[in-house]
Image (tube, rainbow, N blue to C red):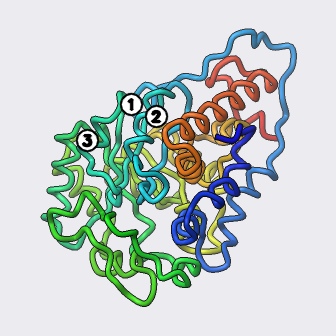
Amino acid sequence: MTELLNLLELEELARARLPKNAFDYYASGAHDEITLADNRAAFARLRLAYRVLVDVSRRDLSREVLGLPCAMPVLIAPTAFQRMAHPDGELATARAAATAGVPMINSTLSNTPIEAVASAGAAPVLFQLYVYRDRGETEALIRRAEAAGARALVLTVDAPLLGTRERDRRNRFRLPEGLEVANMTASGRGALPAVADSGLAAYVAEQLDPSLSFRDLEWLKSISDLPLVVKGVVRPDDALRCVEHGADAIVVSNHGGRQLDTSVPTIEALPRVADAVGDRAEILVDGGVRRGTDVLKALALGARAVLLGRPILYGLAIDGQAGVERVLAIVREELDLAMALAGCPDLDAIGADLIA
């Protein structure tokens, strides 16, 4: 693998390795891709007011998230169809997560069944959930995740329909031959429709339930004892209502800029959500994280941890498990250095006063 110096180099390296259909699916955002770019730009606009004359001869990057041990405050975000990037797909990612000591969130739309992913490595696996129109199938999916040892449900709530991803429409996105939504193959819902547009957009419109409401958080809590994480929130009032209806954690997320274009960048939404929720639930954030300083900024603004998505896919495309391991190692190295230079010997020392 080409020696990576930082995560910003990943996208072009992955572009050279991947078929256009796969690369555009991973890289694209909705419509004009304004939010896709803003997620990154909003981190770059923040300035750090670092401390000096602090003993940082030893740094501790570890913490628990949802009661799970994390070697650093990073989780692998749920990303669909990982076997388009590498034949080992989600299995390679799970093994890399175990090496790095971070949890992995496995997608409903995985190319590998949850049972195989959960048994692939020693890292905790959480299960990202889409609610299907057939609630019986949804409950069966939850039971499989529980039986496989999933440590939490991560409910995505910002996709009642799929955002318009024009690159996918232009490519008439569909899965390569031999790949399916592996978690749904047995139910007959594993294949994307063959349409003259995005097959995934058609699948979401046909299969997923657009009537999802706050009441369904209570339904999920009533049928499963797993912690419930709600992903896709950018408003403090929505975050509070999620907590009131049973959410144990909130992921401030705009789906990587892939749903409603011109929506607020997540790092800008984060502090308002964190202030509103307080200590009633854990707050995580994703979208645009590419540097260790981004992780530092997210923690300073109220996140307990960040989720890392596209860089994981790009690392997987470049060199499989080793590529994902390198991505996670870079994030750790950069965060460790950022903490030292900012005067933070541990994560509890990272506060809002660091943001100028």
For disc 2, the marked residue is 97
Q: Earlier in the sequence, mark 3 or mark 1?
A: 1
Looking at the image, residue 273 sits to the left or right of residue 122; the answer is right
Q: State the CA–CA distance, disc 3 to disc 1.
A: 17 Å
Q: Which residue is mark 1?
A: 123
Name which residue type carries label 1.
Ala
| Quarter of the C terminus within the rendering | top right
Q: Is residue 237 above or below residue 243?
A: below
Q: Is the Cβ of the residue at disc 3 closer than 8 Å to that at disc 1?
A: no
Q: Secondary structure at mark 1?
A: loop
Residue that appears at 62% across and 23% down: 348
Q: Is residue 267 left or right of residue 108?
A: right
Q: Amino acid at mark 2?
A: Ala
Q: Residues within 10 Å of mark 3 (few under 14, many from 20)?
A: some
> Label 1 vs label 2: CA separation?
6 Å
Q: Which label was assigned to residue 226?
A: 3
